[in-house]
Amino acid sequence: MAFKGEDHLDSLPLPVQRMHLIQVDSVQRWMEDLKLMTDCECMCILQSKPISIEKDEQNELILSSQYSTCNNLQLLLKRAWIISTELTRIAQKLEKNRWQRVHSMTVRVNCHVRSMINEYNTFTRSSSEEMHQLEKLLIDKCSEFTAFTERCIQTEDEQMLGSMKSCVNETLTTVAQYFGQLIELVFTHEAQNLLRQIDLSDSVYITESAINSLFSLTQEGAHLCRIIAKEGGVVALFKICRQDCFRCLYPQTLRTLASICCVEEGMHQLEKVDGILCLTDILTDNTHSEATHAEAAAVIAQITSPHLTFTQHLSSFLENMEEIVTALVKLCQEASSGEVFLLASAALANITFFDTMACEMLLQLNAMKILLAACSDKRIVDTPYSRDQVVTIMANMSVLDQCASEIIQGNGIQLLMEMLFEKSSSGNTAEVAACERVQQKSAVTLARLSRDPEVADAAVKLSCIPRLIKLCRSPTERNNSDSVLVACLAALRRLAVMSPDGLEDSDFQQLVKPRLVDSFLLCTNMEESFV
């Protein structure tokens, strides 16, 4: 009896039949040979593995085990996230008295907890007595929780279920508490292990592996960054950045430092170990690679971020600011890629918020000319994120009267006009937000610079007024952004004073003549009428 498809195979052209037969034959042959091949491969691998764990071979063993550390930590994080999510969902189902779901989810949590503990104990080299006690407490409490919810689904007495609910809630709270304490202890223990390797090892390979695992942990949120900072992560990483033998590891070390310094504990540690001075030395040392300079710029951008509320204690930054700003301007000028330019310009943009003196320094360093020239190179300034940094610097520098002539000479008004047309090509949320910031800041910069008649005249000649009117009247052009609307109204009013002939009467009556808040409400109501 023929199988389905065999008759069809016979009717195919000969080359196709031959190809099919060859493929089948190859697979069968491979399957037959596979066992012998893998046996041979296993023997080769086993022969190359050290069996002894004597002290002189310990480093080699640690090196081979480190390749999987990052994956093991990721597995642990994933398991912890699942348990945390399940505990939250149990609380929600419990609130709705869905006892069957509560029980089934409790059983699942019990399994996940045991799996997490078993998995962790298979790859950790040592655990403290406190950790073992917490593991036992958590497992016992999970078992108790499962037994408790099982009794709940076996009774139909609503009054009894009501009285048991508070006990279940209490047990759930205790499970969550033990779980939180264990996870905190586990990641503290892992951070300590990694930092111990970084601190004690003189092997580039072991140190690199430990730094990569540490970086992986920092990507899981501020809480883990706090643990790492508390355990001395910033101190250990700056120690690496002060040793020439680890120069090849500076980029990933600095990248990890930038992540840790998103939390206040990291910033305090950076100040204590003279981290600013170390970063200044790296940025001003021309023997370092561009990648190292770029990652040092990323740390500067992080610690000067205007979104952070705990940067005021960085007194040492002001002492080194001139050297840092000079090095960053040079990095922008010599950047070989968009990513390097983005990191350097982001650091400069943040510094202009950090201290007003920075704008005067940038003016003296001809930074505006350098930044405007970079914007004409699509290979370097290639995203809305980079343009956002450039226009931020322009907006902050535009408060200086001398800045206007620099911008005009560098064709900056043309650039600002182009930025009013910034649109996202991907529709990605972050990119759309960056485009909104570019539009808003370019309008702000125009408003500030237009106090100079020469700038206002250049803006009018480049048809900035019709574009500003379009942004005010068309919500889709500004992506329904109120901040863009306010900035455009302000710029339009400033230009209207300098060149009233550029507006039609209706635009003047609606967008310029009323109070700013009334024009704003008119334009936002216009948005509602289109919906």
Image (tube, rainbow, N blue to C red):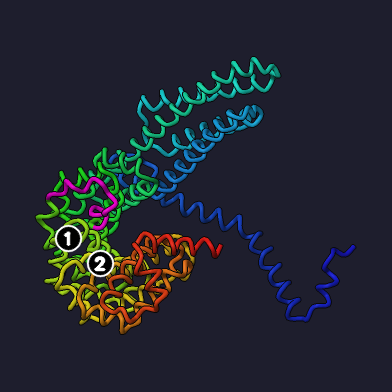
How busy is the neighbourhood of tag 2: few (under 14 within 10 Å), some, or many (20 plus)?
many
Q: Residue at x 35, y 47 (%)?
A: 218
Helix, strand or loop under label 2: helix
Give x and y (percent) for residue 479: 46, 65
Q: Which residues are magenta?
A: 301-315
Q: Residue at x 27, y 42 (%)?
A: 229
Asked whether residue 499 is drawn in magenta, I would say no
Name the one closer to the observer, 190 or 32.
190
Q: Is 313 on the left or on the right of 229, as rendered?
A: left
| Residue denoted by label 2 | 395
Name the one closer to the observer, 132 or 93.
93
Q: Tell me which corner region of the image, top left, top right, bottom left or bottom right, holds residue 447.
A: bottom left
352 w.r.t. 188: above or below: below
Helix, strand or loop under label 1: helix
Give x and y (percent) for residue 339: 32, 67
Q: Main secondary structure of the magenta part?
A: loop
The C terminus - image quarter: bottom right
> Is residue 249 in view?
no
Q: Tell me which corner region of the image, top left, top right, bottom left or bottom right, holds residue 383.
A: bottom left
Give x and y (percent) for residue 58: 31, 42
Q: Residue at x 21, y 72 (%)?
A: 451
Give x and y (percent) for residue 26: 66, 68
The amino acid type found where label 1 is placed reads: Ile
Asked whether residue 311 is drawn in magenta, I would say yes
Q: Tell me which corner region of the image, top left, top right, bottom left or bottom right, holds residue 27.
A: bottom right
Per the rendering, the mark at residue 282 is 1
- Residue that protrudes farthest toward the left in the picture: 319
- In space, the residues marked 2 and 1 are separated at their CA atoms by 29 Å
